[in-house]
Image: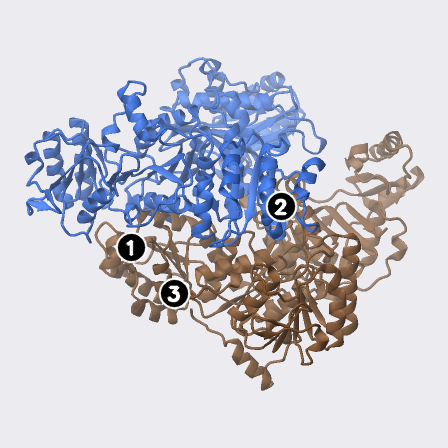
Chain colours: A blue, B brown
């Protein structure tokens, strides 16, 4: 509960005073007036629920129901059309048949309505004519400047200004139920699926995690998840952001918002679905989005320090920790428990995530031991036993460990099922949590009672119930605490060159690929393309023994498979025989292929086999990848991606992210590899791919042999694919 | 809910009729009379709670409180001592100070008490004198035949015979609360931690999963987790078993019970804690158990088809699926949803676990499409939309898919937060689930209401809330359905040999190790140990070029590190130079080492580098392991263990369990490896290790080069370690 933030009302004042920049979506999220187009008296159906949700949540602005069939609804005057309202309207909420939506929007625009949310379905997700209607909506938004969310959206909920512009039952207000609120900091939720967005909200409320906004993006004809993310990043009532996406459409806005979030250090927890084949198939028809290639999404998330979670409870556990705790300064965790078995499990759960559970110093153990029975233990995990709750050992352990510099976080593992017994007294726990400098996390192995949740909420604590999720969340907090936005790529590393003369065919042979790379400024071994046997002598003299010879053809991608490679050639005689054999093999296996000749080059020094490449993602454009070469990359899928370009620092971080990273650091007494040279190569190739994204779709350097520290690397083979 | 089992009362009748064998622990779990030693009138403290729990749960047998300070407690006559009771006693529950426990047990034994549960703490978990008291308890049990559970136990709860011999608040009965029961099949819980055992129970009840028994094992002076497992395996009121262990003490009983569970196909879900360093440290002091080496535990679990889960909710999700569904016949899943985003997530969650989410055939899609709006989709995931609930699309989808042979399981993803609306009608859902031949799993993305849980429970359905857990659980069901207990090892494969002449030193050199292995019947290349340069000529002539030469000393484990290996020697001159160099290097690096000579052998054919080994686990004895060789094994920890010995079939299953398995099957167009020969080697080595467990603690064959199918393998290097 440490670190509170001003509520939205403060922000409105700040904005009025010019202290904070107003945001174009302020009138969307906190409208002074709402027109409800398609309003209904039937509370059981969606149109009727929209009105009742607004009123139950005590929306403070003006509501104008619009429906030609009524003169009034629930005591409010009902208008025949938008034009009849005759007052400024910040937001129109539209729930009418799909075919009537566009005319209604035209009327809205004519009446000067600033924003609209289209709840109606039956647009791009159906394809055909319906998709065309959505295109027309997008065009209208561009033409008129009116901002439009949806169609096929579930609307939004703004907690502080009390705007429930949604039919979601999750925002229903039940008489007599006092909401559980444990955190002063708030999470904001952006979801392309309304069902999931409001499920986050529903589960957050059950935990007592305060929420600032929930917004469902739907088909995103105009307003998209990227722009909503931008709003929450700049919003001072939002401290943590939960993002659920199927596929990003407003890519530039999304990337700008992501960068801003990293800069202001506002955590974003993201769930990206449509990762499986079936998931992608469904995403295409659901909100008509292309779920895309999830590795590219993960690469973008990694760049901006987004916390990726693909489970609802896990994502909320992370959000709950962030909303109720400061960030940890290190990875040492104390586990405090009342049950031995649960304490062992707690220690395992955090250790599984690479966190430390250090044995405590004797002075600290001595203090704790005084307040527990002899069969407890104070080593860490600290088992004060069930008796330790009543004898004060539990609270004392938390007190001592909060103040100690021996641990960076505390995990309290206990049973909170009782409807009457309190393991902590509010007056003892609250002061500790008010001044906490490290996370204190509460996990109950039994199902917590409503009583216990409310008791702990008084001190600002959220009770969590998934131990594995807690371990994962504590790990994420440690990583997020140390995350820094990487330095941008250094564009001065490579001079701008015209590469178009090299890109005559879409797929380049190795020799042509290497020639392009040399022009671009990438260092490669000196090699000679021998077109005719007569040139071989001179080539051999220039390269020197031992040498490697490889058949060259843009049509032969896998040279080994056609007997197109000879290595370790140490005599002229061998070289001549090899030349003939390579040409013969190529003619035999691929009689129709255009043969450019044989590439003669030196044998590379030994090194660690690495693959470096770039490719073009349909959503995010050029991406760079690195992996351990040989069979390992494919078998263990040990590759790391980032959006191109990357700087040297981010390239190093990519290498550190490989499972095979220890290999580069001098594994089993081997020499350290030249990680610096490799990082530089990754950065340079990524810059090249980004700069020539219009011409080059793919670069593959495979293998790159990375030599010992200071000895550089050798690009053994290369492939460049141009845009067709 | 398909597949019910007779309740325990049926079993008692069956036992009486001699249809079922009685079990020695019947009088422990269903005692006709209980003496409560240390009974108290104070319901707030543990002794008083024991009595009140027994009575609140309506224990039908006789209760005899024993406490010299009272003449009666809560209307029951209270006895001064056990001897005073003068009636047969099946079970004594003991909750008195530690030092008084042993005398009380002596009195129990004298009075003919059959079983005892010691709740009191302060024994082996404290060490020293307290540990000695526990040893005396164990001795008493052996001497008298009285069966003793604990000390430091939380007791047990038998649901059907209504025996709440525990102070756990989880078994408290709240007036007016009707328990939620969704399943007719029951789970039985064995836990070495009472806190966790009863937490499982508490969470199972919240889900509506019926429970047969919960038993906490505590310090296991006599009765251990293995024997309790045995009871639940043979118990006909238990259909699924949940096991929580820190470390197994009654290993033989545990293994026998595990084998029996596999034979009768009763699923066991196991959580093993103490996997981390801190966890092991805590386990040692908690129930005074040694948590051991978790890889050995996992190997044992794998042999018997145990389902390993290290998260409470995940374990219960698996248990809930098993208790409410038949096993699936394949891995094709239909995801049915009312929210597009949630459906995509559901498809991702099962696909992540390697399950299939196939697009449905057009006839099935056509049937479903009739009952949903045009913006839904019937492809799979099937999004009937929110409207599809009222229009019947949801129920219809479940009906059609249950009957279809296109999928093997159904995942229903929906929001069950409403307190009033039912997504399914009991009269429509129940008949489908009563006759179901495949799992139908219900997941709510919002927090389910008590109303919804109870409504679905009427049809036998459990509502789950963790999507990732559901995916994992569905995978486990598929795997468990196809699990078969492997054939035992074929002891006739290797003849019994006396190996003691080979085991003169604890660590054998390569040459000595290979000599031992040859004697044992393992095929190895023909190699010659050359002790003197004069013998080299003959050795070279016998082996033939090209050859490899390796220094031999029991004190030099890593020959490469002392310049002790030469390969690819093709001339006599090279051989002589190598011989001298190897001896020189050894003398230089390790002047004090005893040098046996140089091992001269043929160069091995190419092959996939594999490591095969055995080691001795302190709990389970000899274990066999296999891994991909070279750096990969260590870097990616790609190794598989099993208890030794294994048969060829289980050895093949080990290989299939490697991440690198595709490499053996002909990766990237390479030839298939001789998996048969490798399986046979694993089986033989495991048999050797098991048979000579008293003499050999470790065998390491590294590398083994596995050649193409039919070409066998070559053991390149070998190390045998004897018992010191």
Query: What numbered label is drawn on residue A116?
Result: none
Residue A91 drawn above or below residue A388: above
Query: What numbered label is drawn on residue B457?
Result: 3
CA–CA distance in space, label 1 to label 3: 27 Å
Few, some or many C-alpha atoms within 10 Å of disc 1 (few <14, some 14-19, many ≥20)?
many
Residue B115 drawn above or below residue A237: below
**Residue A672 in which image quadrant:** top right
- Front residue of A400/B435: it is A400
Image coords of residue A650 (percent x, y): 51, 24
Residue picked out by circle 1: B378
Of the two numbered discs 3 and 2 in the rendering, the one whose residue sits closer to the viewer: 3
Tag 2, which secondary structure?
loop
Q: Is residue A309 visible?
A: no
Residue picked out by circle 2: B638
| Mark 3 touches mark 2? (CB < 8 Å) | no
Residue in the picture at 48% in, 29% down:
A613
Few, some or many C-alpha atoms within 10 Å of disc 2 (few <14, some 14-19, many ≥20)?
some
Q: Is residue A695 visible?
A: yes
């Amino acid at each position: 509960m440490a670190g509170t933030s001003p509520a939205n009302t403060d922000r409105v004042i700040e904005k009025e005073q010019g202290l904070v920049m107003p945001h174009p979506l302020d009138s969307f999220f906190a409208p002074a007036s709402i027109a409800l187009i398609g309003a209904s008296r039937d509370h059981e159906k969606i149109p009727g629920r929209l009105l009742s949700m607004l009123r139950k949540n005590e929306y403070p602005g003006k509501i104008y129901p619009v429906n030609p069939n009524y003169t009034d609804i629930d005591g409010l005057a009902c208008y025949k059309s938008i034009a009849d309202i005759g007052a400024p309207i910040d937001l129109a909420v539209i729930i009418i048949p799909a075919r009537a939506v566009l005319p209604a929007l035209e009327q809205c625009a004519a009446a000067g309505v600033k924003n609209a949310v289209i709840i109606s379905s039956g647009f791009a997700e159906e394809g055909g004519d319906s998709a065309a209607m959505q295109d027309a909506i997008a065009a209208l938004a561009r033409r008129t400047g009116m901002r439009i969310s949806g169609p096929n959206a579930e609307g939004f909920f703004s907690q502080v200004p009390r705007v429930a512009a949604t039919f979601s039952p999750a925002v229903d207000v039940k008489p007599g139920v006092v909401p559980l609120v444990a955190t002063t900091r708030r999470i904001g939720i952006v979801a392309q699926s309304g069902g999931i967005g409001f499920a986050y909200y529903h589960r957050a409320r059950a935990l007592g995690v305060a929420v600032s906004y929930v917004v469902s993006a739907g088909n995103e004809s105009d307003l998209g998840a990227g722009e909503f993310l931008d709003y929450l990043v700049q919003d001072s009532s939002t401290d943590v952001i939960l993002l659920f996406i199927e596929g990003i459409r407003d890519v530039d806005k999304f990337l700008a918002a992501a960068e801003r979030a990293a800069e202001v250090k506002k955590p974003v927890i993201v769930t990206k679905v449509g990762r499986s084949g079936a998931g992608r198939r469904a995403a295409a028809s659901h909100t008509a989005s292309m779920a895309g290639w999830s590795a590219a999404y993960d690469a973008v998330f990694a760049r901006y320090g987004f916390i990726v979670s693909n489970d609802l409870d896990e994502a909320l556990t992370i959000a709950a920790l962030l909303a109720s705790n400061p960030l940890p300064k290190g990875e040492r965790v104390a586990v405090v428990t009342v049950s031995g078995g649960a304490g062992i499990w707690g220690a395992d759960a955090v250790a599984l995530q690479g966190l430390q559970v250090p044995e405590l110093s004797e002075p600290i153990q001595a203090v704790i031991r005084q307040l527990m029975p002899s069969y407890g233990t104070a080593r860490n995990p600290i088992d004060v036993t069930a008796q330790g709750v009543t004898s004060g050992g539990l609270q004392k352990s938390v007190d001592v460990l909060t103040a100690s510099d021996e641990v960076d976080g505390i995990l309290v593992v206990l049973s909170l099922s009782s409807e009457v017994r309190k393991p902590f007294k509010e007056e003892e726990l609250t002061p500790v949590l008010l001044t906490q400098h490290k996370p204190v996390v509460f996990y109950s192995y039994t199902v917590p009672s409503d009583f216990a949740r409310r008791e702990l909420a008084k001190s600002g604590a959220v009770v969590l119930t998934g131990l594995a999720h807690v371990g994962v969340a504590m790990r994420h907090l440690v990583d997020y605490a140390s995350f820094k936005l990487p330095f941008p790529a250094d564009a001065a590393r490579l001079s701008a060159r015209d590469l178009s003369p090299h890109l005559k065919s879409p797929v380049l042979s190795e020799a042509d690929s290497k020639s392009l790379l040399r022009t671009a400024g990438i260092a490669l071994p000196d090699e000679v393309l021998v077109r005719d046997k007569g040139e071989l002598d001179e080539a051999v003299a220039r390269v020197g023994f031992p040498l490697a010879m490889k058949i060259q053809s843009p049509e032969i991608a896998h040279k080994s498979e056609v007997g197109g490679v000879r290595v370790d050639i140490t005599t002229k005689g061998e070289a001549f025989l090899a030349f003939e054999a390579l040409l013969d093999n190529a003619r035999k296996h691929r009689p129709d292929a255009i043969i450019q000749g044989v590439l003669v080059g030196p044998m590379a020094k030994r090194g660690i086999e690495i693959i470096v490449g770039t490719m073009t993602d349909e959503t995010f454009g050029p991406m760079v990848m690195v992996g351990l070469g040989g069979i390992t990359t494919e078998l263990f899928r040990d590759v790391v991606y980032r959006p191109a370009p990357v700087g040297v620092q981010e390239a190093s971080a990519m290498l550190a992210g490989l499972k095979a990273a220890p290999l580069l650091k001098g594994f089993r007494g081997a020499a350290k590899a030249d990680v610096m040279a490799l990082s530089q190569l990754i950065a340079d190739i990524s810059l090249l791919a980004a700069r020539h994204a219009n011409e080059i779709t793919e670069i593959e350097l495979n293998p790159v042999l990375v030599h010992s520290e200071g000895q550089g690397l050798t690009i053994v083979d290369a492939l460049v694919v141009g845009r067709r």
